[in-house]
Image: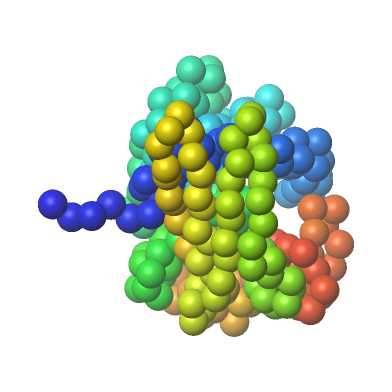
Amino acid sequence: MKQKEWYETWFDSPYYHVLYQNRDEEEAEQFMQNLLSYLKLPDNSRVLDVACGKGRHAVYLAENGLDVVGIDLSWKNISHAQHLERKNLSFFLHDMRKAFYVNYFEVVFNLFTSFGYFESEKENQRAINSMSLSLKKGGRLVIDFFNSNKISKELVPQEYVTREGLMFLVKKQFEGKVISKKIYLQDRGKEYEFEERVQTLHMSDFQKYFEICKLQIKDVFGDYQLNAYDENNSDRMIIIAEKI
């Protein structure tokens, strides 16, 4: 039997959501509002949230009058998200490397570093190709990725994090172009170990992916307030590309 990839195990684990529960909801909502103000989408525009998790951003988009579909590889995430479905909001279990609703959406969102999980450039390209295929001509792809230049300078090798009475030991290191994060915890007498692996992708990597599938970069922002991108100092690399 083929061994599961780390993201198939970790994202389906309840401990993933415990560890990351303190993510700033207010900041995330403000980011979504800033994006919508920038994109100026008409009501009922069709948008796709790729790697949607439990659906919190898709819900926000639907509440703002858009026709939203969310896809994710984690069946547990999708099972949770499907309880939130309504007339203009639906969720599907789907691998981002496979085509989904070709030439259908005005915008495809891939948010909060939900890319770079794969081991090969070929798989990265397949994922970008699929997102591009989902877009109508003139549609826009929004990719929100961490700024690898800054992350590389500020990596914390080890930290302890306490959530809901559980203590997580998180160890990070570079393995070539990959940031490897090992997560250790004990719960009810059992020991658990999980892993996250994210490639340290740069603007030049995305430019290469986009060129192959006729996506043209229109804007790059460096934070959730949509300030200009600075390759050395910005926290994020938020790319807006258009299908030509």
Residue 163: quarter of image:
top right
Residue at image point 73% right, 63% down: 236
Marker count (numbered):
0
Q: Tell me the quarter of the picture where residue 230 sits.
A: bottom right
Measuring from the top left, give residue 48's x and y in whole percent: 52, 42
Instruction: Please provide percent x and percent y for residue 233.
Output: 82, 73
Is 103 on the left-hand or right-hand side of 230? left
State the colouring used for the structure image.
rainbow
Q: Quadrant of the C terminus?
A: bottom right
Q: Is residue 41 above or below residue 63?
A: below
For the point 84% across and 68% down, the residue is 228
Q: Is residue 235 above or below residue 78?
A: below
The answer to whether residue 136 of the structure is visible from this angle is no
Residue shown at 68% from the left, 69% from the top: 155
Of residues 178 and 156, the one drawn nearer to the viewer in this rendering:
156
How far across and how far down the image is residue 103, in percent? Answer: 43, 50
Q: Position of residue 164 (x, y in %)?
A: 64, 29
User: Which is more toward the observer, 155 or 202?
Assistant: 155
| Depth check, front residue: 56 or 61 | 56
Residue 110 visible, this orientation: yes
- Residue at 61% x, 41% y: name it: 167
